[in-house]
Structures are given as C-alpha cells and as structure tokens.
C-alpha cells in the first residue's frame, strides 16, 4: 500500500508504516487518518511487528492545522481519530515507533499507543493542543497510563515542549539513541523481536495490559491462570 502521504510495506510478518509528508513535517490530514486506520487494520491481519516512522526531519507535528474544515459534524471528524486509536489498540502484535525531530499533538498519541518507542536524542515532544485552543481529549484519555497525574497535567495544560531525555524519564518513549543511528537501531530492535516466538509476544502484551487493571492482591492468581492457559493453548 503506497500513496502520496502513507507508505506501507509488509514482508516476513514485519510491517513498516511511514508518514510521508516531509515538506509539511508529516502533518496529518483527515485523509491520512483514514489511510492510517486502514493500514493498521491490514497490518493486524498480516504482521506480528509494526514499525511506525516519519520521513524527513520530523516524525510528525500532529494534525494539519492548515487543512480546510471537513464537510462533516465535529463528532464525525473526531470519530475518525477514535477509529485510528481503536485500530492501534487492537493490533495484537508489537508496535514500535521510531521518532526523530518533532513529535507534537496527535503524533505523541501515536507514540504512546505503540508498545515500544525509540527516540533520537535530539527529538522534541509537545502536547500543543491547549495552546492552539483545543482540549486534547484523546490524549487525556490515555496519558495517565503513562504519566503521573501532575506530570500529565503539566504537559497538557502548559503545552510546553520537552526534550527526548525528559520524554524518556516520563515514560513516553522506551529508549534514546543517537540521531544518526535511529534507523539502524529501529531495524535492530525489529530483528530482535522477529527472533522471538510471535505467540509469546502476543500473550505477554495481552497480559501486561490486563494485569495493570487488577488490584495487586489479585495478580498472583491471575498470573497462575494465564501461565497455565498459555502452556495448554500456546496462545
């Protein structure tokens, strides 16, 4: 799947999904949201690992604020973003983001919804919606899974820009790598994940999500049940 703004390749159960509007800092248009949703749905059926990246100097500056308003209701427009988020949440394999340059607004949401995220040491992050006059409801629905409440409020309410090192400390990204080595580091991580049993990766990802919702006292029993179930089903 390739168009002017999104490129998707799938080979050997590995999907590489790239934002391709480098001249516009990979600002995401309404059409791109639909294309991304369709791409992730396809990847869910055909790949075990998905690498999301952006062409050019920036990962993405988020929604394209210069785009003409869509001929739809606000609910319909935001429903498309919800569909993309649902598609990402439903991807059963391991999703990985490789972030360079700026990752703002919606792009931070993409990074957070990936299981792993590598960032160039000079990457920058910002939740800039409040500064632009928009309450970022989709981000706020997810951010407390990653950040303590006061840290989340600081980023959301001030729209301040943070360096990659702070993003790593806060848990927005997994690792920092030298900017010149971002691509190679991402591919090495993809190869490492590819060497693992896909069923074990999927089961581990499901368990990490499920156990987080349980009271601490219930976790040992849940671990016993799930470990035994995997041993019996290998799923």
Image (cartoon, grey):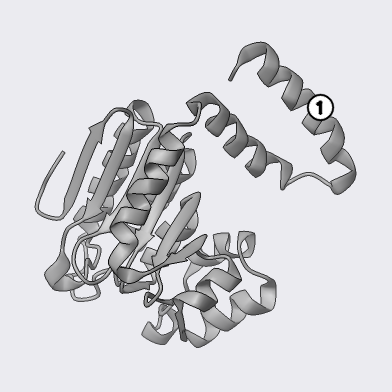
Residue pictured at 48% horizontal, 34% vertical: 92
Dot 1 crowding, Cα within 10 Å, few <14, some 14–19, many 20+: few
Quarter of the figure with the N terminus: top left
Viewer-closest of 66 and 205: 205
Query: Residue 178: image x %, image y %?
Result: 37, 69
* Position above or below: 92 against 186: above
Query: Residue 30: image x %, image y %?
Result: 23, 58
Residue pictured at 81% horizontal, 27% vertical: 224
Mark 1 — residue?
Answer: 224
Query: Residue 43: image x %, image y %?
Result: 33, 34
Query: Residue 48: image x %, image y %?
Result: 41, 32
* Position above or below: 31 against 93: below
Residue pictured at 50% horizontal, 76% vertical: 165
For residue 77, side relative to residue 117 (left or right): left
Work out whether residue 178 can be spotted: yes
Residue lying at the far left in this picture: please name it.
4
Quarter of the figure with the C terminus: top right
Locate residue 153: give its quadrant.
bottom right
For residue 165, side relative to residue 44 (left or right): right
Residue lying at the far right in this picture: please name it.
217
Viewer-closest of 79 and 139: 139
For residue 147, side relative to residue 161 (left or right): right
């Amino acid at each position: 799947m390739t168009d002017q703004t999104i490129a998707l390749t799938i080979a050997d159960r590995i999907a590489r999904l790239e934002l391709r509007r480098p001249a516009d800092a990979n600002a995401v248009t309404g059409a791109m949201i639909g294309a991304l949703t369709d791409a992730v749905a396809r990847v869910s059926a055909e790949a075990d690992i998905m690498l999301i990246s952006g062409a050019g100097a920036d990962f993405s500056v988020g929604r394209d604020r210069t785009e003409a308003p869509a001929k739809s209701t606000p609910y319909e427009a935001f429903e498309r973003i919800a569909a993309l988020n649902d598609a990402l949440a439903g991807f059963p394999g391991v999703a990985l983001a490789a972030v360079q340059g700026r990752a703002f607004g919606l792009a931070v949401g993409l990074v957070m919804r990936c299981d792993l995220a590598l960032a160039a040491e000079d990457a920058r992050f910002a939740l800039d919606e409040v500064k632009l006059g928009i309450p970022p409801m989709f981000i706020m629905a997810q951010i407390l899974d990653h950040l303590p409440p006061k840290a989340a409020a600081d980023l959301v309410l001030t729209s301040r820009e943070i360096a990659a090192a702070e993003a790593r400390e806060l848990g927005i990204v997994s690792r920092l790598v030298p900017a010149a080595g971002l691509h190679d580091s991402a591919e090495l991580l993809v190869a490492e994940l590819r060497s693992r049993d896909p069923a074990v990766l999927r089961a581990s990802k499901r368990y990490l999500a499920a156990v987080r919702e349980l009271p601490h006292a219930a976790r040992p029993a849940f671990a016993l049940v799930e470990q035994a179930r995997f041993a019996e089903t290998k799923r």
